[in-house]
Amino acid sequence: MNVIRSIINNDNLFVYLIAIILSTLFIGYAPSSIALGVFVVVSITYGLVNKVKIKYNTTLLLLMSLYLFLASSILWTVDVKLTLKGIGRLLALFLIPLSFLCLPEFSKKKRNLVLKYFTISNFCYGVLFILSACVNYLKTKNLDVFSYHKLVTVFDLNAIYVSVFFSVSLYYLLSKKQKNVTDKIGILFFIFLLILLSSKMILAILAISLFIYFIYFNKFTNTYKVIASGALICMVIALSSKQLVTRLQEEAKFTKFNEVLKKERFDRVYLWTGTSFRLFQLRLLSEQIQEDKIILSGYGLFASRLSLKDKHEYYNTYKGFHYYNYHNQYAQILSEGGVFALILLLLILLNSIKSALRSKDFLFITFSILLIMLFITESFLWVQRGLIFSSVLLCLFNRSCKSTDVNKLPTD
């Protein structure tokens, strides 16, 4: 027992475990799942051995409540097999906050140590992506290998998810009061990577975050704040990759809102854009609510895909779309858990942004904004990387006690 106690009471053990969980999310499900399993077991053991008195935390309890409610949809689901699969897939949504409740609060110093290790790993991944793209360029002579999904093909990743991870590292470096040369290089490198990855939503969030940073977290005069923030936002826009500019032009040219909302039949070669596809998914959700009366209870966890597939077959869309989710976390939750599950999700996000604003912590504020906006375009929690990443950081931020070693809003 003394050996176990000495191991689990190691001062930085949980810092290392959380950093490993976050840093292995890019390299497959097994490493991060194993790290998460170890973290859960050790955290619960720590709580039992040290008889930790669980301290009430609204956000963590809401996360656990959301999982339990979604799991309870097994009672009314339209497909028991799919819902059982979902209950297993989303188990981390319950286990991660439970584990954090078994631990004492993290100091801001330890929280930032987790993010430091996470940022170092992301920097290494970024270098690897660039080197891999250089090799691909030598083979293809095509500059497109340096942008969007093609930049991260070495691990078969999604550019949007990679952008989210890199954004948090960027905001961590920006949040540091004292920045050395390495930090400044890291900031420029992550901005450069985000531009190459070309996610419209992430770049929009980046612009908002930089605006907040220069207005509220830098000791400039008001005139210089406006000039610096405006100049930096313009720089981000001006330096955006050619592929992003091309995609924006295609979105504007080929997104036909009236057709997407009213057209009765699409052929298999209909020209879709990211915006038009997401809008069409919302149209389907509206029809599902009207036809199947799912507003209160939903179809059941993971069970919306059957109706979505039928809808896409009816409208004769591109076959690959038949197996897509809503690409909108709010729509996904509403469809599968009904309005009560959606309310729980909104309460989690609202409580988190409320705590962030109260703490006046730039990093916490930008992370909360990131999740709120990201959920508009991605069913982020329905993918293992997104689920673990969001749950771990939500718990970490909401279980970090007050300190003064990060950038905070002025209190005058």
Image: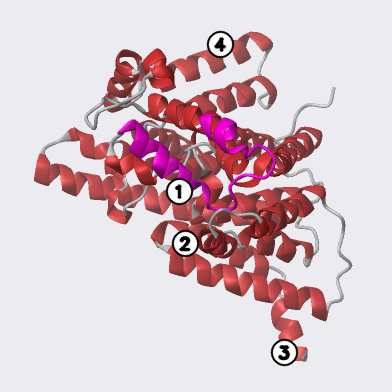
Residue to which mark 1 is pinned: 306
Location of the C terminus (image quadrant): top right
* Circle 1 Cα neighbour tier, 10 Å, few/some/many (<14 / 14–19 / ≥20): some
Residue 227's tag is 4
Residue 403's tag is none
The reply to whether dot 4 and dot 1 touch (C-beta < 8 Å) is no
The reply to whether dot 3 and dot 4 touch (C-beta < 8 Å) is no
Report the residue at 21% width, 34% height from top. 144
Q: In the visual, does 17 lie left or right of 157?
A: right
Residue to which mark 2 is pinned: 24
The CA span between labels 3 and 4 is 58 Å
The reply to whether dot 1 and dot 3 touch (C-beta < 8 Å) is no
Q: Is residue 9 visible?
A: no
The reply to whether dot 2 and dot 1 touch (C-beta < 8 Å) is no
Q: In the visual, does 285 lie left or right of 261?
A: right
What kind of residue is marked 2?
Thr
* Circle 4 Cα neighbour tier, 10 Å, few/some/many (<14 / 14–19 / ≥20): few
Residue 3's tag is 3
What kind of residue is marked 4?
Ile
